[in-house]
Amino acid sequence: MSAPVVTLVLAHPSAGSLSAALARAARAALASVGADVRVHDLYADGFDPRMPTCEVGTTELADELVARYVADVLATDAFVIVHPVWFFNVPAILKGWIDRVMREGIVYAHGPAGMAGLLRARSALLVNTANGGEELERGFGGDALVNLWERVILGTGGVTDFRRLRFGGVAASSNELRQAWLAEVDDAVRSLVVDVRNRLARGDG
Ligand SMILES: Cc1cc2nc3c(=O)[nH]c(=O)nc-3n(C[C@H](O)[C@H](O)[C@H](O)COP(=O)(O)O)c2cc1C
């Protein structure tokens, strides 16, 4: 069986951030289990989050980077998405990735029977860093990120197996705790790929 394709998305400007370290851990775990990893390192790639006029309401791909990202997303069996919580939401550059890549006609379509997912991926792991605890997020009316990723973006595309790791209290975290978080990501990525391989072997849609 061919290697499962996994798209790893990172939205953080700093290579020294915890998010970047977690993405590196995820990438290393993916490589060690033989996944075919497609990395979307949005800041490092120079991704432009501004949607050009020609992409609005179309499936046109205005630049080569977006064309590569779309090809990866359509080929992918699973997503690993790593980003900090910024104002209880995604960093702006990642909202641009959602707008320009996860578009109608690419990731989902409106058909006679309603909305249909166009992704082959069924699994995703979201990894978030934050300073506040989860209670704080819920206090602002529910977890905006789970709703956005699980239901609005990935669920619409056809992802049914949604997993999340959320590491809060980053500013005050010890080195030991950060090492433990890196190990958690390593474990979560490995079990994601095991489950994806099993699903592909069963031939489940
Ligand atoms: C623009 C901005 C907005 C932020 N908003 C939040 C927030 O809504 N909730 C929260 O817990 N932390 C918030 N933070 C703190 C970051 O989540 C925190 O610095 C980050 O997760 C630390 O991990 P990193 O090393 O991966 O950046 C914000 C930080 C920035 C720069």
Image (cartoon, rainbow, N blue to C red):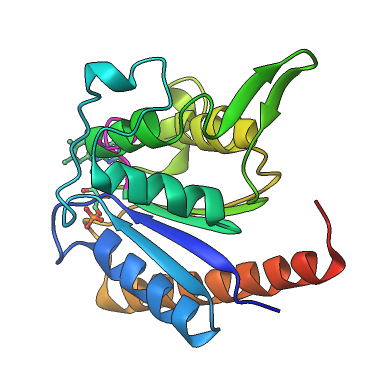
Above or below — where is 165 with respect to 109?
below
Question: Residue 31 vs residue 22: left or right?
Answer: right
Residue 11 picture location, percent across and down? 27, 49
Q: In which quadrant of the rendered view does residue 18 lie? A: bottom left
Residue 51 picture location, percent across and down? 25, 24
Magenta highlight on residue 89: yes
Q: How many marks?
A: 0
Residue 88 picture location, percent across and down? 35, 32
**What segment carries the magenta color?**
84-91
Does any portion of residue 89 appear in the rendered image? no
What secondary structure do most residues of the magenta stretch adopt? loop
Give the residue at x 50% y 30%.
148
Q: In which quadrant of the rendered view does residue 199 lie? A: bottom right
Indicate the quadrant containing the N terminus: top left, top right, bottom left or bottom right. Answer: bottom right
Q: Nearer the viewer, residue 199 or 186?
A: 199
Quick one: which residue is furthest to the bottom in this view? 32
Question: Residue 46 vs residue 2: left or right?
Answer: left
Q: Quadrant of ligand 1?
A: top left
Give the residue at x 54% y 55%.
75
Above or below — where is 108 with respect to 7?
above
Above or below — where is 87 with respect to 131?
above
Give the residue at x 21% y 56%.
171
Does any portion of residue 200 appear in the rendered image? yes
Question: Residue 40 vs residue 50: left or right?
Answer: right
Q: Nearer the viewer, residue 139 or 162?
A: 162
Magenta highlight on residue 130: no
Give the residue at x 29% y 32%.
96
Above or below — where is 56 with respect to 13?
above
